[in-house]
Each structure stands twice: as C-alpha cells, then as structure tokens.
Amino acid sequence: MADNVNGLKTGIFGGAFNPVHNGHISLAENCISSLSLDRIIFIPTAQPPHKTSQYLVSKQDRLNMLSLALKDDERFEISDIEFNRQGKSYTYDTLVSLREMYPSDSFYLIIGSDQFLAFDKWYRYRDILSLAVLCTALRDDVSGKKQMLEFAEKLGILQNGGFSFIPGDVIQISSSEIRDMIKNFADISPFVPPAVNQYIAERKLYGV
C-alpha cells in the first residue's frame, strides 16, 4: 500500500478476483465517482470464507491479473495484506488492520449485490458496519431492487449513514461465469481487460 495520507476517503474492495473482470472495475469506478473517493484498495483474499478453493488460481496469478487490469489508474491500489495471515480471509480482521494502519481514513467497503444479500452471514458483520460504510450497486431489475431494499431495511442500515447504494450501470458478469466460458472455449474478451485475457491464455489458466 501507499504511504499513509491523513483523511483519505478509501474504498476497500475485497474478493477472490479469480479472475478480475470488467464488472469489478465498473463497480469501482462508479464508487469513486458517486462517493468522491480518493482511492480504492483492491484486496485479493487468500482463502475466501464463503467460496470453494477448487478453481482458485495462485495468489501470484491473481495479483498479476489485478496489476494488469488496474495499472493505468492511479486511484486504484492493490494490497496483499490477506496473504500474510493464516486461515480464512475475514473482512472484519482486514478492516481492523487497515484502521490501525490508516487511523485517519474513512473506509467504504465495496461488495457485489450477491454478497450484499448474504451479508448477515458474514463473520462479525455488525462490527464491520461500525468500521466502514457498506456500499453496493443496485440490481438493474425491479424484483432485484425490491429484494435488496427489503434486505437493507431488515439489517437496519437503509438510512443510518453507514450504507450506500451505488448508482450507475454495472456490467453483469461473475468470475465463475467467466471460468465456465473459458472451459467451454467461449470468447471472454468482452468481459475482461485485454491484458488479463492475454495473461489467462498465455498461462493456460482455468483449463485453457
């Protein structure tokens, strides 16, 4: 991570990034613009607590793909903080560490809509809400929006200042869908940055 600068509005974007795709990047860009963030730190998880590791490529491959995808935008940083801990990667632990490293920063935790709808299953999710503003993009269908709004109300976070729906279109694609496309020899170029597409092909990742 970069040297600490007091008072930054810092987005925290964790995930397997297996692989990073255009949906991740468009969500991050929307968060930057709608919340006036100074930076977003992408944090790949070492061992995602809610996902199987069966198709998880190496830590270095995921870091390399993130570097290729984000290298042209100085607002985006990458941290390997979760690779330095043993066991599963819990967001709460990461936020506690970041709070110690950057005590003057305001943190905005960026998660996808599917993760948001399972947020009450996260480890110490109430404590996470005390450490960061929770941010996610509304789904683009009526029933999806209604489901998300009802869930936010259930959690009691709809209007407490610690939660934000992010406006703007987000590319609807998931890493698992991209991995399936690769296994079926489909063209993934519309969904990942060109350098990431080339890296996957050259390294023969995901069954290429």
Image: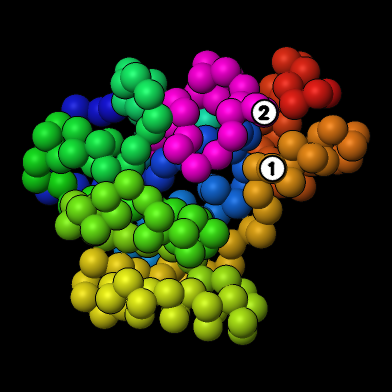
Which x, y percent locates residue 74? 39, 37
Q: Does residue 99 lie above or below 114 as drawn?
A: above
Q: CA distance from mark 2 to mark 1?
A: 9 Å
Which x, y percent locates residue 19? 62, 34
Identify the residue at image location x=27%, y=50%: 124
Residue at numbered disc 1: 176
Is residue 177 in the magenta section? no
Identify the residue at image location x=55%, y=39%: 51
Judge the density around disc 2: few (<14), some (14-19), many (≥20) Cα neighbours within 10 Å.
Answer: few
Predominant SS of the magenta segment: loop
Q: Which amino acid type corresponds to the residue marked 1 in the rendered image? A: Ser
Location of the N terminus (image quadrant): top left
Which x, y percent locates residue 79? 36, 28
Query: Pointers 2 and 1 in contact (CB under 8 A)?
Result: yes
Is residue 44 in the magenta section? yes
Q: Which residues are magenta?
A: 42-63
- Taking depth in this image into account, of 156 and 175 the one nearest to the observer is 156
Identify the residue at image location x=54%, y=48%: 25
Q: Does residue 145 lie above or below 43 as drawn?
A: below
Q: Which amino acid type corresponds to the residue marked 2 in the rendered image? A: Tyr
Q: Does residue 163 lie above or below 39 as drawn?
A: below
Q: Does residue 80 lie above or below 15 as drawn?
A: above
Instruction: State the SS at label 2.
Output: loop
Which x, y percent locates residue 90? 34, 38
Residue 68 appears in the picture as rendered:
no
Image side of residue 80 versus residue 200, left or right: left
Residue at numbered disc 2: 55
